[in-house]
Amino acid sequence: MPLHTDWSRIDDAVFVSPHIRALVEACIPHLAGTTRIHTIPNRNVLADYVRPKLPGSEWTLGMIGYENISKDPAWTLDVLDILRREDARWRLLLLGRDFPRTNLTGPARVYRDRFESRLDALGEAVSRPGFTDDVPEALRQIGVIMSSSRREGTHEGLLQGVASGAFPLVRNWPYVAKWGGPATLYPREWVVEEPEQAARRLLEATADRAAFDLARAEAAEWIVSRFDWSTVRPALDALLLEDAP
């Protein structure tokens, strides 16, 4: 709660992403005058996600966690609808729990009901296997990882999906786009504004299978080299441990 914090009592502030840092700095203009500021990603051990994809995964969009409005899975359904008009092989795999049945606001219930109605209409084009403890194995089925969220800090599900070798489609998270959004974390070419742009980017990428496979491998290498714990830990060690370099 940055507006309720006495920053003169805080030695160091660590943000997990540049856009969240920029948002707080915009709210607290004097922050840098009292507190040392750092941007260090969350802890992610990504090596286990590098596994061979299963046949057919190249036609499968995927989301890891989708059960609330902030993840906005209906945006991903918009992308899927456009893709299936071009090729009926496209499908969607939703990993995680379904929307809750209780403790939802009125707008959240309306959103859930409309979303589930669309899922019913799509039939076998969408799979919902539920929650899994083995995300790396489940990701072998997913060739395209979606980040359709309205807001995120770093979106760990996206990181895991890209590390697994899935092609990234990242919405320009609208609630934080003003402060740079996902483009402060990931290559700008991964980020799209609208479902039509996302579908077009994917259709162009998959037109050449060899180039598509290369793009996925390069994205995985990029993510692991920057967000794996082996890279992130030294920055936290240097901040927190007196004897660290």
Image: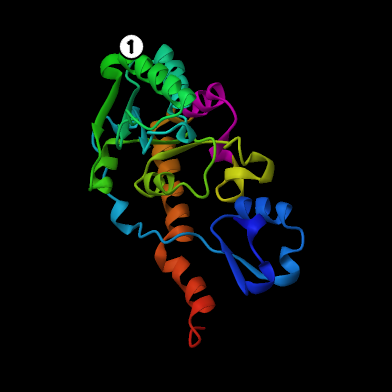
Span of residues in magenta: 189-204
Give residue 83's position: percent from left, percent from top.
43, 19
Determine which quarter of the picture holds residue 36: bottom right
Q: Secondary structure at mark 1?
A: helix
106 to 133, vertically: above or below: above
The residue at 27%/48% (across/down) is 136
Determine which quarter of the picture holds residue 140: top left
The residue at 57%/25% (across/down) is 194
| 161 left or right of 27 in image | left
Can residue 72 be found in the magenta stretch?
no
Residue toward you, 114 or 221: 114
Figure colour scheme: rainbow
Give residue 41's position: percent from left, percent from top.
50, 60
In the rendered view of the protein, which quadrant contains the N terminus? Answer: bottom right
23 to 39, vertically: above or below: above
The residue at 32%/36% (across/down) is 142
Return the residue at label 1.
121
Q: Is most of the magenta stretch helix, strand or loop?
A: helix
Q: Residues within 10 Å of mark 1 (few under 14, many from 20)?
A: few
Identify which amino acid the numbered label 1 is placed on: Ala
Residue toward you, 26 or 162: 26
The residue at 53%/24% (across/down) is 195
Give the number of marks. 1
Residue toward you, 204 or 117: 117
77 to 172, vertically: above or below: above
Give residue 114's position: percent from left, percent from top.
41, 16
